[in-house]
Image: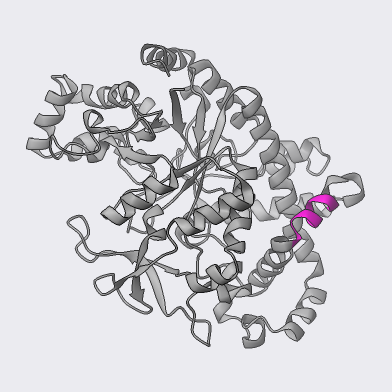
Amino acid sequence: MRKSCILLHISSLPSEYGIGKMGRHAFEFVDFLVESGVKCWQILPLSPTSYEDSPYQSFSVNAGNPYFIDFEILEGDGLLESHEYKEVEWETIPDKVDYALIYDKCYDVLRVAYSRFKPSKFPAYKEYCDKNKHWLDEYALFMALKFLNNGKPWYEWENDVAMHKAKALTACKKELKKDIGFYKFLQFQFNRQWQELKKYANDKGISIIGDIPIYCAYDSVEAWANPKLFLFDRKRRPICVAGCPPDEFSPTGQLWGNPLYDWEYHRETGYSWWTERMAAAAELYDVIRIDHFRGFESFYAIPYGSEDATVGEWMIGPNCHLFYTIEDELGRLNIIAEDLGFITEEVREMLHYSGYPGMKVLQFGFSGGDNEHLPHNFTTTKCYAYTGTHDNETLNGWVESLDKKSLKFAKKYLGVRRKSEIPMAVIRAAWGSVAEVAVAQMQDFLDSPKTARMNTPSTLGENWQFRTKPEQFTAELAKKIRKLNKIYNR
């Protein structure tokens, strides 16, 4: 069945509170998708943000972002009074998330809600904590310790605590009992609100496409509490870290800095950690997009401490053995493979044998007629066609960046005369392609300028800040998108 999809992260939803929430405006966005005839809603990782506010650098692969917890729902539960959050100044720049401000204000409000929380009035709380004990206990302790240490990374804590020594942790658990309870409360409320939103979307015929980063952050509960998962030395420092080698777009490559997995350990343990992770993702999402899929075939390892990615080596990953093991344990999951970047024949082979649909990005296609990202070169319907991803320009920004030759080719290929017509023509090309799902960022349906770009890879600051306003989701726009879906049978 041919479908269409809109990419819009929770943080970008309309909100009076500085950042998108899982409340009223999220439910209204689902209604907008229904009116538009769109069947899929894609979001970015739901994890708490840490380094440079990126959802791809999180304190935990399992936890949800407390920023998305809706205050109005907490008020309805008797945990907040309206003045306690409505009288707070939540933004400094309209249309952008001010993460520093949110960090300063959000937890204060949530702590007020926690002070009124009585587990006996929420029977699902104990059930949630018991079900998620395998990760929740360590995560809550980790966050309580991070708060105690003024946000410092775990490897800068007192040595016995940083090294996860049992005796030191026993004392910490007693001392930080209230804070540990607070972080468990946040995860319970996040999960409760998310599951209600997801159920609403599913009941309306909307599938949620979620995103999981391949790697964990170094400053994460996984690296702190389970170092055997990673290629660490005896002092729990990474031996090498993740990134991408230099190419024509980045002369010094991309240095991500994430610790790399000890795949031998994962194989010996039957990939149990990965199986648990995928099982959790399958509860959160209807379809799971795995970021940097090529890293399972081979991955670029950069010596720890390097200033850039110019020096590194390719190392072999688990390939399809990992996915076959997960499938044996969990059954067939709905997975999208982010097969972008430096793609070799071996990676193509892994994608083929996994059976997962890959991605095509039309913005990558206009460098020449034989490019695989142009719709006439799609060799299978088993793919997702993106006008652009969260790492790309808005279509307006992309058009501005085209050189003369590429611009001329884009006009010819798309059958338009004016530069201003290109963005909509790119959307039509994706919708008209053979791909089973066509995806566009919400920015491109809103005709947003280049300043609405979600992320520019390998840059710090000014990323992940895009926001929308309620008045942008008009009946006219819904009608326009529905017409597009009808024309192209999506």
On whether residue 129 falls in the magenta region, the answer is yes
Q: Give the residue furthest to the right.
A: 120
Q: Position of residue 147 (x, y in %)?
A: 65, 68
Residue at 57% in and 53% down: 326
Q: Which residue is drawn at 42% across and 31% down?
A: 442
Kindly identify the residue that appears in the image at 13 percent across and 19 percent down: 417
Please give left or right for residue 340 compared with residue 377 in the image: right
Residue 486 at x, y percent in the picture: 41, 12
Q: Quadrant of residue 178?
A: bottom right
Give the quarter of the image for residue 426: top left
The answer to whether residue 283 is magenta is no
Viewer-proximal residue among 63 and 268:
268
Q: Residue 244 location, x and y as percent?
A: 30, 63
Q: In this view, does 140 lie to the left or right of 224?
A: right
Is residue 312 depicted above or below 474 in this figure? below
Name the spot of residue 425 as percent of width and height, x first. 25, 22
Magenta stretch: give its range.
126-133
Q: Is residue 62 in sight in this rendering?
A: no
Q: Is residue 287 visible?
A: yes
Give the answer, above or below, for where 206 lies relative to 342: above
Principal secondary structure, stretch drawn in magenta: helix
